[in-house]
Amino acid sequence: MINKRLLIKNLLSHNDENSFYDKKSQIDISEKEGKAKFLKHICALSNSNPKNNSYIVIGIQDEDNKIIGVDFFDDSKIQNLINAYLDNPPMVQYENISFPHLPDDKVVGLVTIRPNNKLTSLKRNIWKYYGGSVFFRDGSMSMPKVFDIVIQDKNSEIVAAIESHAQNNIQYTLDGVIAFMNKRRDFDPKYLVFQEYFVMCWAGLKKTSNNKTFYSRVDIALINEQVRLFYSDLDEVSISYSNDWFKIVEFVNLGFHNSSAYYKLEETLIRFESNASYHIESTLLFEPPRLDVKMLHHIHNSNNKIIEKLEQGIALTAQENKDLFNLPISYLMCHFNGFEDALSRLIAARSLLRKHSKAVYQLYNESMRILRKVKYN
């Protein structure tokens, strides 16, 4: 089994970006340009590596390879995006990898692109790239090719050697368990062993409501691979497990104006097999609530006025500052209830919210995460 933290270190130590891996400080698939560039890199790496895995490492400072990290990203439907835009799409996995020196809310993103020995191309237009375009890696660049397309296998031995040097062992596993238990000692950390092989650690702040147990501040990691499976400062989570599976049901608070309303968002089931393999199944449970249209019209207009004030640099009133914390989720609720411009207004306000308040920007990211899961399901 590959220790993904070691794998990232080995990739970063292997000169610079090349035809089997790329590095990014961040990616943004919430907007068309970022989505298009991400798809281009997936296409290019897949075509340049027909026989071996290829990788994108996210959260790396380009000038000096410094590991700066990115926000935890849990879009389990990213394969649906790739299938929607690429012909002969490769299988792609996005994982969140913990590093000891990073803050709790930061990880390194690792995108693994499996070989499919087929020519991958854009299925339809996106941003400035045309449907039918084919991309390959040319050194550290993803370049279009329009003639003399020949799929070559030139990286298999190099990648196999890198992956071989990243194999896990008992010391890495024990060190990982001890580090997790120490770091999460304020949140009742636990470890579980599945099929006598897989070691999972998890921790959370426990609370009971109506005879049901929920957790917040949840952190779940598969220690063998140093993969963080779940992390949240905000959500409510229910957890259950048996001898060979571990289940997470995530709830999101869609209440606003001093109300709380929790809705099921997603169920994640991790099954551990006796042949030293595991697989993850994610099922979207979310059903957007239907709210009073008259009330939403009032909220929508209030949100628009707040954004206009931020754009013009006008100070907000005390009530508007309170409403600002409801703005991301209330715009999202308007979108789910048929307000056609609510989503575009929310996305357009992104830079304003990020500049104004880190807490509000975090709520914006949470709203966009919910939207991604619903959209690509």
Image (tube, helix red, strand yellow):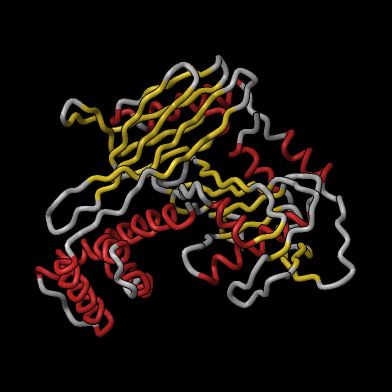
Left or right for 233, reference 46: left
Q: Visible in this render: residue 360?
A: no
In the rendered image, residue 276, in percent from the top left (x then y), is placed at: 63, 22
Q: Visible in this render: residue 371?
A: yes
Residue at 63% in and 28% down = 168
In the rendered image, residue 293, in percent from the top left (x then y), is placed at: 19, 67
Corner quadrant of residue 355: bottom left
Corner quadrant of residue 299: bottom left
Residue at 63% in and 44% down = 8
In the rendered image, residue 338, in percent from the top left (x then y), is placed at: 30, 68
Corner quadrant of residue 130: bottom right
Residue at 49% in and 41% down = 98
Say which of 188 and 327 sits in front. 327
* Quadrant showing the N terminus: top right
Residue at 29% in and 47% down = 252
Say which of 50 and 181 sits in front. 50
* Above or below for 250 versus 323: above
Q: How many marks?
A: 0
Find the residue positioned furthest to the bottom. Answer: 312
In the rendered image, residue 81, in percent from the top left (x then y), is placed at: 56, 57
